[in-house]
Image: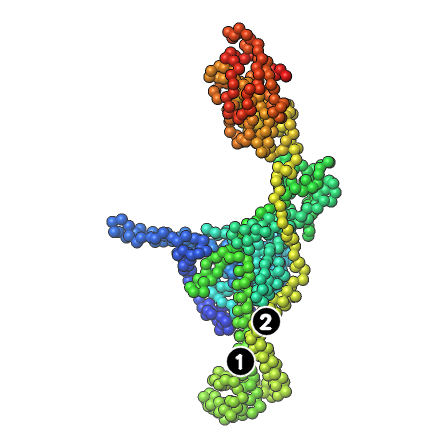
Amino acid sequence: MAKKTPKSSDQPELPLGDTEAPAPAKAAKPAERPVPKWATAPATESALPPPPAATSKVKGGQDEAPLAKAYRGWFLEYASYVILDRAVPHLDDGLKPVQRRILHTLWEMDDGRFHKVANVVGAAMRYHPHGDASIGAALVGMGQRGFLVEPQGNFGNLYTGDEAAAPRYIEARLTPFARDVLFNPKTTVWQLSYDGRNREPVTLPAKFPLVLLDGAEGIAVGLSTKILPHNFNDLCRASINHLQGKTFRIYPDFPTAGIADFSEYNDGERGGKVKIRAKIEVRSKQILAITELPFGTNTETLIESILGANAKGKIKVKHVDDNTADQVEILVHLPAGADPEQIIQQLYVFTGCQQNLSPAACVIVRDTKTGLDKPEFLGVREILKRSADRTVALLKQELEIRLGELDQQWHWDSLERIFIEERIYRNIEKSKTWESVLAEIHAGLKPFLKQLRRAVTDEDVVRLTEIRIKRISAYNRFQAEEAMKKIDAEMKEVKANLKNLTAYAIQWFETLAEKYGKGHKRRTTYDEIEQINASEVISANQRLYVNREEGFIGLNWRQHEFVTECTILDSVMCLMADGSLKVSKVADKSFMGRDILHCAVFPKDGDIHFYTMVYQDGESGKAFAKRFQIGGLSRDKLYPLAKAEGSRVVFLEVSKTEKEMPKKLFIALDGRSGARVRELEFDLTPIPVSSRSAKGLTVTKWPVKEVKRVD
């Protein structure tokens, strides 16, 4: 493990690779973050529009109000802050600021043992000024995933949704994987913490696409990000393929497993969609077992959705048992006679057993021209390519730093060998001043300068004077030569790796896969998921009743007239005595209209039955007969079958086919009418089958008392 960064209060020199000076002894006021250019100028992928131009003068030429300048850009600055410093991960290390600060804190505290989470949270507040709740939640989340933080104790259950124990009861430490891929103070760029007392990394030098490994989700101002998690070994192989110049494709792998359809994944960009289902097994005719969950759900929410669908009549189950611990097992008990395959389809349609995810991979990217950060929407393949390229750059930087260290060590060891073997230290015995000491050593080294690779500086000479007498007396020439040979061999190896940098980076990923890839097989299987038509799988397990006089329909009204078996997705059509027609969705209770003459489930593709109706027109008083079909209708809209208000239906018959329609009707007129013939037969065959809006043919001008079918 790399040597840890000394505390800023000790005021050491920064190691190689640092680009900022350490924090001063006194707390310095942190510099204000400038509003980035992407927030004030339009960009291709910028999520925020440019602010309106503000004027410095108000009407009449007077200066603007004192607080106007302060409030002019407040929203833009706030949006920039939330996007850059809270909600969206950075492309360089795949971490949000709170995660980066937690990991940096764990690295500072790391001694190989577990630390109380409460202590870690308190220490992380030196860097993260947003309270312990956000730090604790982020730490628990990383502990549940387990790639970067190793948990000990009750960190909750990802399957059941159970919360973690209190921070004082649980412990955490860095994983070996995190130590290998995240930390190197020699290649870290540092900045002052928010209060200027400490320094923290701008981004960690991550040598792995962590943002794709763990995934990320965040809601900022004006944009959001949702990056789905991927498999560790898949990412290693994809990185190797990219470095080898091969094409590759990666799909998410969810910790809760499940069956996913990635046909519309769209490389994780905006507009893509992922369908994912729970894995359901048939244990017996009366028991279904859910053994894998859709990503984003847990057993509690899934069981609630099943019970809710059962209460609404969408499915029928007896009860549900949750046996989940280390593995998911939800047992769904079915009623006698139920079809397990049909119930499985209903679970996918009406419960949380199937989910649709909408990825939108947004990350913070540093503009190489301006040096400022900005949000950018990228595909997961582009994210992986940039991460692999950054890994190559970091490995190159580490090799160059190591080569410089070896060269420096070779120079110092060579000087020490010459200084001791040639007994140059004896030349300074009679020197009385410091200047004469340095001069004597320089003079003694002069004949041997050709053996060195660079010039000797006063700093080198001063270092020679610091060698202890005990070390000089115990000097072993053979051991010194062996040490020099090891340095030469390592320098040769480092130079070879620099010359073949791509092969070295490929070996890096192969080593990671071999070291940490065991036990990380894909959990999520992918297959094409067909869309299920809810109307085709739902069971007709509801009973429809009607209260004709008061005009209500409803489900499970045993005290009223039974109509038919139906489903909760059905629509009901009613024809009322006033000649009105209405279609409404099945409900526990719904008003259709008084004096219902006909009530039936309305077909989804439109009604194809044939209707024969005789009605008394409310305007002219005449009786009309019509034969018609209804066709398609809209829900909750009142359709008049008789044009005038006050009309009254005196006869209505519904036939399945045109041949079954009545041919003749017996008409009995009202006895109080002035008609001389009060009973007659009316031939319906001349009346064509038309639409519901047809007026029909005149039967009589007198009020009709009764109508009966003759044939």
Return the residue nearer the eye: 159 or 5: 159
Where is residue 260 shown, x and y percent of the image? 62, 50
Residue for point 47% across, 20% down: 644
Residue picked out by circle 2: 504
Q: How many marks?
A: 2
Quadrant in which residue 399 is drawn? bottom right
Q: Earlier in the sequence, mark 1 or mark 2?
A: 1
In this rendering, would 682 be left or right of 84?
right
Residue 654, given in percent of the width and then of the height, sits at: 60, 23
Dot 2, crowdedness within 10 Å: few (<14), some or many (≥20)? some
Residue at left 62%, top 26%? 657
Looking at numbered disc 1 in the image, what kind of residue is underneath it? Gln
Residue 692's x, y, as percent? 53, 25
C-beta proximity under 8 Å, tags 1 and 2: no
- Residue 664 vs 143, above or below: the answer is above
- Residue 570 horizontal/vertical position (percent): 60, 32
Q: Is residue 613 above or below residue 457?
A: above
